[in-house]
Image: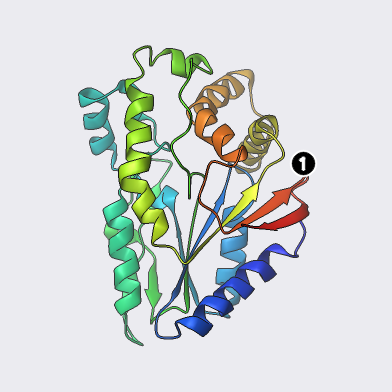
């Protein structure tokens, strides 16, 4: 993965926003399909501590397991699976952002954290703390900036379980009513654009293999195929340009940057 120009672009965006509004942290969203490298770059910049960056992910603000179970009972069973819009607690994110913006030099601000191994939000006592007031807040997420995707016939086996379209319609409404105002509050959104949906599935498999330190079994590949189907419609829509973004960073299959597009 090239070291340039993604970190430089993020850094320059922070500096530009801070020049206009030095009294508060720059609020920047980093978007991109699974495996595109968005969390990698955020953590890399966070670790440099220059500028001082507070970072968390949309993955850290998932609803609790109990909340998703209730949503699955009351709206549609597919909402048990975390990831798609409606499975995030945007109020939790807004609270963390507000706390970081109001922080003093010695303030210890807890940042949301989700335990994927338990498929539940980590206890607040285990959340990381950010000390002081950051110069920038980075929030990454696969659907950061997404707009409601076009409707149509089911794309895959998961969507065939949504025969009446309730799951898809609920997600689209949430993107319009709840997520759009959340995204609009960001100073800038950078989108790391994969070359195709097919490479997204390959990248997601690479992530799993690195995590497990071994090849995936046939059963694990089948489970992963099903998991990414929850993301397919919105990911394809974003690849087609249906999103809010100030910058689109085009990637090739190796995640190298081929073009940077200013919108």
Which residue does the image show at 43% across and 41% down from the upper left? Answer: 117
Which residue does the image show at 72% across and 58% down from the upper left? Answer: 260
Left or right for 123, reference 172 = left
Left or right for 143, reference 43 = left
Q: Residue furthest bottom?
A: 105
Tell me where residue 122 appears, x and y as whole percent. Answer: 33, 51
Left or right for 152, reference 43 = left
Which residue does the image show at 56% across and 40% down from the upper left? Answer: 238
Count of numbered circles on the image: 1
**In what quadrant of the picture does the C terminus appear?**
bottom right
**In what quadrant of the picture does the N terminus appear?**
bottom right
From the viewer's side, name the closer residue of 156 and 203: 156
Say if 212 sits above or below 5 in the image: above
Q: Is residue 49 in sight in this rendering?
A: no
| Rendered image quadrant of residue 173 | top left
Say if 191 sits above or below 223 in the image: below
Q: How is the image coloured?
A: rainbow
Q: Is residue 118 in sight in this rendering?
A: yes
From the viewer's side, name the closer residue of 237 and 92: 237
Which residue is disc 1 drawn over? 253
| Rendered image quadrant of residue 107 | bottom left
Tell me where residue 54 appears, x and y as whole percent. Answer: 45, 70
Tell me where residue 74 appears, x and y as whole percent. Answer: 20, 25
Alpha-carbon neighbours of circle 1 within 10 Å: few (<14), some, or many (≥20)? some
Tell me where residue 191 appears, x and y as whole percent. Answer: 59, 52
| Rendered image quadrant of residue 42 | bottom right
Which residue does the image show at 27% across and 26% down from the upper left? Answer: 72
């Amino acid at each position: 993965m090239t070291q340039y120009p993604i970190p430089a672009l993020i850094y320059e965006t922070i500096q530009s926003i801070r020049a206009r509004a030095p009294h508060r942290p720059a609020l920047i969203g980093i978007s991109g399909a699974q495996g595109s490298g968005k969390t990698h770059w955020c953590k890399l910049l966070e670790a440099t501590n220059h500028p001082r960056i507070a970072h968390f992910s949309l993955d850290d603000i998932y609803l609790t397991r109990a909340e998703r179970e209730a949503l699955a009972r009351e709206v549609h069973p597919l909402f048990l699976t975390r990831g798609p819009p409606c499975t995030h607690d945007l109020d939790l994110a807004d609270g963390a952002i507000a706390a970081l913006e109001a922080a003093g030099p010695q303030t210890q601000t807890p940042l949301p954290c989700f335990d994927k191994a338990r498929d539940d939000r980590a206890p607040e006592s285990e959340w990381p703390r950010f000390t002081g007031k950051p110069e920038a807040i980075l929030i990454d997420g696969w659907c950061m900036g997404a707009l409601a995707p076009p409707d149509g016939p089911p794309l895959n086996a998961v969507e065939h379980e949504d025969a009446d379209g309730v799951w898809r319609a609920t997600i689209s409404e949430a993107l319009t009513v709840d997520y759009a105002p959340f995204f609009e509050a960001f100073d800038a959104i950078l989108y790391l654009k994969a070359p195709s949906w097919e490479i997204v599935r390959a990248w997601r498999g690479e992530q799993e293999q690195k995590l497990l330190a071994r090849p995936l079994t046939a059963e694990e590949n089948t489970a992963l195929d099903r998991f990414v189907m929850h993301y397919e419609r919105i990911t394809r829509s974003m690849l087609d340009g249906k999103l809010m973004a100030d910058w689109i960073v085009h990637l090739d299959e190796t995640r190298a940057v081929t073009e940077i597009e200013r919108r």
